[in-house]
């Protein structure tokens, strides 16, 4: 018997509530709607736990299949294009006729990526208007281009080849061989080969000036770097000391839009800025002319596409202006590797134009007025009713794209805060963290900031996800228990209060907690103010600082934050990228920067983590080397340790608050109705915008 797609059920329920229909405000978890996947007999990739792939936006719920435990280990090569010849955009055809561009057959690889279309074959032309908030909003660009070697599909359940042709593991999963697309080219026409991966590995990853600490995904168990070797011009082998079961998901996470994440770089272009290839005197001259502080700063700028439109890219669109400009413009890449099933080179859309908005409120007004063609980022969920009311006038439609769980406004408590030693000691006290969680009235927050949507929960995956640890853990410490919060606070020595009723530290000073928050997403400042008032109700003086994102991030990386609010957008991906559950992740909202430093230096620097943190890390590392069903059980256990220690406190989850309310131009076609929405998926990049087009 086929089961209903719980994702679709959740979306329908959200729609009902948002449009004012009388129903229960709390979205039911419906764990019975989906059985846990059965274990694969062979080692598997990290499950994303999505329901069945979205085949057509109009598919009936009954047609949904049960989720599988994980994407397949081996990538499936794209089918050969059926067309007898390739076609191209009219503006490119004109350049070919003028002798300014090679024919399309010479620009495409021997076996291009054949990208399925959601509804129909499209037509060329048009501009995708999108809003952004300035240079600190670079991930807006990264999400749109999503130019990784591999990529997630629309519903997030499978990793597929993208810039590369295929990959296969060794029998013991310690070695992965990646086959590139023969004839693929950078946006300037230079060949895209194994040398571009080896340049990233040898000259950037292993260069401690550019990469002070190795990312977890490329490290062996002893902390050394995995071996990356060139087999031939279009083949690269990655070799680890132990099994690397999540390698394809890591390929899907390493996109070239951001140099810090890329696993490939344009060697032919960047060598001129690297001392391994260019005399230092020449580099010093370029550093001086650019006004940079060092060759490292110059290299980083030159390697980052949003900051340097001269840098060749592999994405479907290439920057022609800088992200610091009021209009950040991307134009079609004439060498993009993808075609539609009829041989039309993608993308269909000519340009992507990011318009600068001074703040999120003005951007939302622009969306309501129909000034944006597809926008999910920075659209506030509380504006959903007026967006729906204005659909016809603004000539757009509104979609809802759900996430994999977590908490949509999560409070991170910095476990390695040392700037104020007394506050740092409090944050590292488990009973203090539990008391803060019990002091939160999540029902008040749900009604005031979430339109009555979602459920009180800790930052764990959704109920239908394979790693879901169970209702007990999702709801642990989420009850509103003021008496218990007060008892716990008294019990840890905060039983003395000043004349205003605020608790005092042993030295007689007030215990003051500062929450840092940015206004870029959702109703986070409102949530912060509500939490502050609730904490003060139990005697903990709380200050809220609303900061610009770049300053918030700078303070986070500098280990200066005490408490901060973000969403746990990596919950469903605890082994991929920079999961917030792993203290070793290079993430500005991380809860243990000095723990990360300790692990990265083999204990020589930073702060040694306590036993429970070491247990958490041990479970993550064991899961990374395991196959299912053991991998899934280890990660379920990891989430119980995670929740039990409350390094991050959840408020409300399972809502479309963060980038889940989507505005789409009424004429824009091939935009899926339902898309998995999470940072590791680079949404809307996983919605395949290369095949979006405007109908006449």
Image: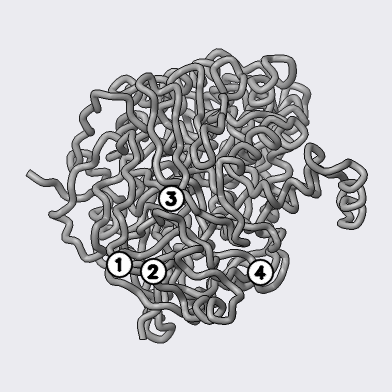
Cα distance in 3D space between marks 1 and 4: 32 Å
Is 503 left, or right, of 49 in this rendering? right
Mark drawn on residue 162: 3
Tell me if mark 3 has few (under 14), some (14-19) or many (20+) residues whose alpha carbon lies within 10 angstroms of its own.
many
Residue bearing the label numbered 4: 320
Q: Nearer the viewer, mark 2 or mark 4?
A: 2
Badge 4 marks a residue whose secondary structure is loop
Cα distance in 3D space between marks 2 and 4: 26 Å
Check the image and report above or below for 230 versus 314. above
Considering only order in the chain, which callout, 2 or 3, is on the residue closer to the N terminus? 2
Q: Nearer the viewer, mark 1 or mark 4?
A: 1
Image coloring type: one colour
Residue bearing the label numbered 2: 86
Residue located at (87% from left, 42% from top): 279
Residue bearing the label numbered 1: 83
The location of residue 276, given as percent across then percent down, is: 78, 37
Tags 1 and 3 in contact by the CB under 8 Å rule? no
Q: Nearer the viewer, mark 1 or mark 3?
A: 1
Cα distance in 3D space between marks 3 and 4: 23 Å
Residue located at (64% from left, 43% from top): 260
Check the image and report above or below for 131 versus 651. below
The location of residue 256, given as percent across then percent down, is: 58, 50
In the foreground, 458 or 78: 78
Q: Nearer the viewer, mark 3 or mark 2?
A: 2
The location of residue 575, given as percent across then percent down, is: 46, 31
């Amino acid at each position: 018997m086929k089961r209903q797609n719980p994702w679709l059920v959740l979306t329908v329920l959200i729609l009902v509530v948002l449009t004012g229909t009388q129903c229960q405000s709390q979205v039911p978890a419906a764990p019975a709607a989906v059985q846990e996947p059965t274990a694969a007999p062979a080692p598997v990739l990290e499950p994303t736990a999505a329901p069945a792939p979205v085949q057509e936006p109009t598919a009936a719920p009954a047609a949904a299949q049960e989720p599988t435990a994980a994407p397949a280990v081996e990538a499936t090569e794209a089918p050969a294009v059926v067309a007898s010849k390739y076609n191209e955009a009219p503006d490119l055809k004109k350049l070919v006729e003028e002798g300014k561009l090679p024919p399309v057959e010479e620009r495409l690889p021997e076996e291009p990526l054949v990208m399925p279309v959601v509804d129909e074959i499209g037509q060329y032309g048009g501009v995708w208007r999108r809003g952004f908030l300035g240079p600190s909003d670079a991930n807006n660009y990264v999400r749109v281009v999503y130019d990784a070697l591999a990529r997630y599909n629309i519903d997030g359940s499978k990793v597929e080849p993208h810039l590369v042709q295929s990959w296969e593991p060794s029998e013991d999963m310690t070695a992965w061989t990646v086959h590139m697309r023969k004839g693929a080219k950078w946006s300037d026409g230079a060949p895209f080969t194994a040398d571009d991966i080896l340049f990233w590995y040898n000259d950037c990853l292993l260069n401690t000036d550019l990469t002070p600490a190795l990312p977890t995904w490329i490290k062996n168990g002893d902390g050394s770097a995995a071996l990356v070797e060139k087999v031939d011009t279009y083949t690269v082998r990655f070799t680890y000391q132990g099994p690397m079961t999540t390698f394809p998901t890591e390929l899907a996470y390493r996109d070239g839009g951001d140099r810090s994440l890329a696993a490939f770089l344009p060697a032919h272009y960047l060598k001129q800025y690297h001392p391994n290839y260019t005399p230092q005197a020449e580099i010093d001259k370029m550093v001086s002319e650019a006004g940079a502080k060092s060759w490292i700063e110059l290299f980083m700028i030159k390697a980052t596409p949003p900051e340097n439109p001269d840098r060749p890219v592999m994405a479907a669109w290439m920057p022609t202006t800088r992200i610091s400009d009021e209009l950040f413009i991307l134009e079609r890449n004439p060498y993009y590797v993808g075609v539609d099933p009829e041989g039309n080179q993608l993308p269909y859309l000519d340009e992507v134009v990011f318009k600068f908005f001074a703040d999120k409120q003005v951007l939302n007004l622009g969306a309501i007025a129909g000034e944006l063609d597809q926008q999910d980022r920075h659209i506030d969920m509380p504006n959903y009713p007026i967006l729906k009311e204005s659909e016809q006038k603004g000539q757009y439609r509104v979609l809802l794209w759900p996430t994999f769980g977590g908490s949509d406004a999560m409070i991170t408590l910095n476990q390695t805060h040392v700037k104020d030693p007394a506050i740092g000691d409090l944050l590292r006290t488990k009973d203090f963290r539990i008391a803060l969680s019990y002091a939160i009235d999540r029902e008040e927050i749900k009604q005031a900031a979430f339109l009555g949507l979602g459920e009180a929960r800790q930052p764990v995956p959704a109920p239908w996800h394979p790693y879901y640890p169970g209702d007990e853990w999702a709801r642990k410490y989420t009850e509103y228990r003021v008496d218990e919060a007060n008892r716990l606070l008294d019990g840890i020595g905060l039983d003395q209060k000043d004349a205003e009723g605020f608790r005092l530290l042993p030295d007689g000073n007030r215990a003051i907690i500062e929450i840092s928050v940015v206004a870029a997403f959702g109703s986070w400042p409102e949530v912060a103010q509500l939490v502050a008032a609730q904490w003060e109700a139990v005697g903990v003086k709380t200050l809220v600082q609303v900061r610009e994102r770049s300053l918030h991030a700078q303070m986070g990386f500098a280990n200066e934050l005490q408490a901060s609010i973000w969403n746990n957008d990596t919950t469903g991906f605890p082994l991929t990228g920079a999961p917030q559950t792993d203290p070793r992740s290079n993430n500005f909202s991380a809860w243990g920067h000095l723990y990360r430093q300790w692990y990265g230096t083999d204990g020589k620097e930073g702060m040694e983590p306590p036993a429970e943190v070491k247990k958490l890390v041990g479970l993550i590392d064991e899961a990374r080397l395991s196959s299912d069903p053991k991998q899934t059980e280890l990660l379920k256990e990891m989430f119980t340790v995670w929740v039990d220690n409350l390094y991050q406190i959840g408020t409300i989850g399972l809502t479309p608050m963060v980038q889940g309310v989507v505005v789409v131009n009424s004429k824009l076609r091939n935009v899926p109705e339902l898309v998995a929405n999470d940072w590791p998926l680079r949404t809307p990049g996983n919605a395949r915008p290369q095949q979006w087009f405007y109908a006449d």
